[in-house]
Image (tube, rainbow, N blue to C red):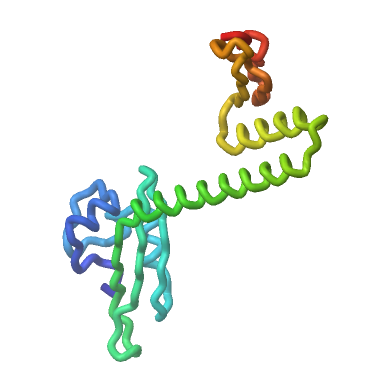
């Protein structure tokens, strides 16, 4: 309503808002809902707007706010629609990560193409570092199959700061 009191709410919206108090029609919205949500009630605009909010439990909510008025003259309140967009955001994040990883691989591939044989070890080490940092891991390795065809040995290793190298321990395994 115009004075910030709740007129209606459905159970799904109550769950999405993570309201820890029982929602009663007519109560002040400021007493019932999280602070991030109350900010939408204070917006003094006659335009509709859209927001995407990440909740503390890694869920995402799209908030659509539209003013309710009588022929754009008398403000009567707001219609606030909430939609759980968590699945869409997860897919977007995965696609973004994949695109960035593919870009990194293309850059590394181009580096290998431009590199002469004598500098291959330098590029291997650079590639391991870039891939390790990109993937946020402690270390990355390259192993080669030994001449006997039975064992393998660690030929190149990158370690994050503070991580002990294991290359000497990973020979003929």
**Going 60% across and 10% down the picture, which residue do you hit?**
148
- Image quarter where the C terminus lies is top right
Vertical side of 142 occupied by 103: above or below: below
Q: Residue furthest front?
A: 148
Task: Please state if 79 lies on the left or on the right of 159 as rendered.
Answer: left
Task: Please state if 78 lies on the left or on the right of 10 as rendered.
Answer: right
Residue 171, picture quadrant: top right
Q: Position of residue 58 (x, y in %)?
A: 38, 45
**Going 67% across and 43% down the picture, which residue do you hit?**
109
Q: Position of residue 43 (x, y in %)?
A: 42, 70
Task: Please state if 136 lies on the left or on the right of 44 as rendered.
Answer: right
**What is the count of numbered marks?**
0
Which one is in front, 149 or 117? 149
Q: Position of residue 127 (x, y in %)?
A: 68, 35
Residue 41, picture quadrant: bottom left
Which one is in front, 101 or 118? 118
Task: Please state if 149 lies on the left or on the right of 63 as rendered.
Answer: right
Vertical side of 86 occupied by 4: above or below: below
**Going 35% across and 71% down the picture, which residue do you hit?**
65
**Going 51% across and 47% down the picture, which residue do you hit?**
97
- Image quarter where the N terminus lies is bottom left
Q: Position of residue 145 (x, y in %)?
A: 59, 18
């Amino acid at each position: 309503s115009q004075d910030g009191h709740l007129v209606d709410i459905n159970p799904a919206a109550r769950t999405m808002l993570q309201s820890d108090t029982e929602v009663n029609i007519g109560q002040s919205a400021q007493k019932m809902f999280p602070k991030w949500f109350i900010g939408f009630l204070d917006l003094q605009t006659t335009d509709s707007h859209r927001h995407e909010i990440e909740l503390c439990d890694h869920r995402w909510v799209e908030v659509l706010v539209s003013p309710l008025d009588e022929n754009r003259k008398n403000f009567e309140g707001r219609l606030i629609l909430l939609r759980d967009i968590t699945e869409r955001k997860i897919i977007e994040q995965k696609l973004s990560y994949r695109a960035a990883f593919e870009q990194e691989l293309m850059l590394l591939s181009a580096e290998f193409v431009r590199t002469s044989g004598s500098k291959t070890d330098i590029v291997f080490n650079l590639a391991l570092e870039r891939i390790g940092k990109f993937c946020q891991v402690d270390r990355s390795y390259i192993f080669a199959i030994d001449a006997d065809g039975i064992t393998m040995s660690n030929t190149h290793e990158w370690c994050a700061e503070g991580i002990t190298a294991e290359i000497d321990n990973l020979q003929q395994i």
